[in-house]
Image: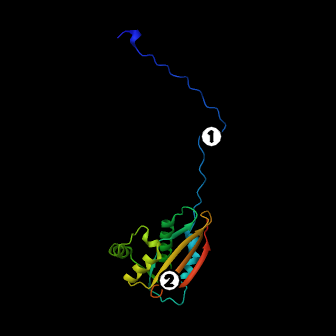
Amino acid sequence: MTESDQLSITIPKLHRLETSEPLYKTLPKIKTVDWKSSFSPMVHAMVSINEIQNGSVLLVTTMKNNTNGNLQTNEATSILIQLLKNSVSNKFQLCDSDRLNMACQILGISADNGLELLNNVVSLARYLDIQYVLYSIASGNVQYPYVNLQILLVNTGEIIWSMTSKSIF
């Protein structure tokens, strides 16, 4: 191969892009809900209900997200459960998670998202012979959600206690 047979490649000269705008946009800061502070007064009110006998078994559902965006509902549910476990009251015994998972498998309910659906939760509670269900819903604007907690009497499906609160950031 001779020099004249070789290919000649011309590389274009690169020009610098002149702009006053940054090449990337900064993401907005995500507000984090202070679930512990949001739930504490609600849990205090809940364990003070006179109509519920001490030691009653309670099934806590996964918080349902009815806001206009994404919300850390698993974290919220975990904190709610911890507050109930750590309350000085012996108002509620919480359903054991192993027992709950086994019942979910037997009844064909997804443990990941099936505990947001009230029908599934009531079926589970009846199967496990649990007296009460704590159903939680976040609603409104995801930046400032409202949280509603409801205690349902499993035998009748009646809401026997309910409280709504604005979340704390």
Give the CA distance from mark 1 to mark 2: 53 Å
Mark 2 falls on what kind of element? strand
Name the residue at 51% across, 70% down.
64
In the image, what residue type sits under mark 1? Pro
| Residue count near mark 2 (Cα–Cα under 10 Å), binned few <14, some 14–19, many ≥20 | many
Residue where numbered disc 2 is placed: 152
Name the residue at 67% across, 37% down.
20
Name the residue at 57% across, 75% down.
148
Task: State the image quarter where residue 129 is shown.
Answer: bottom left
Name the image quarter holding the C terminus.
bottom right
Q: Can you give x and y, in whole percent of width and height, for residue 48 in the image? A: 55, 85
The numbered disc on residue 75 is none
Name the residue at 59% across, 39% down.
23
Mark 1 falls on what kind of element? loop
The residue lying toward the viewer, choosing from 83 and 65, is 65
Q: Is residue 8 left or right of residue 105?
A: right
Residue where numbered disc 1 is placed: 22
Q: Can you give x and y, in whole percent of width and height, for residue 79 in the image? A: 50, 70
Task: State the image quarter where residue 49 is shown.
Answer: bottom right
Q: Can you give x and y, in whole percent of width and height, for residue 103 in the image? A: 35, 76
In the image, what residue type sits under mark 2? Leu
Mark sitting earlier along the chain (1/2):
1
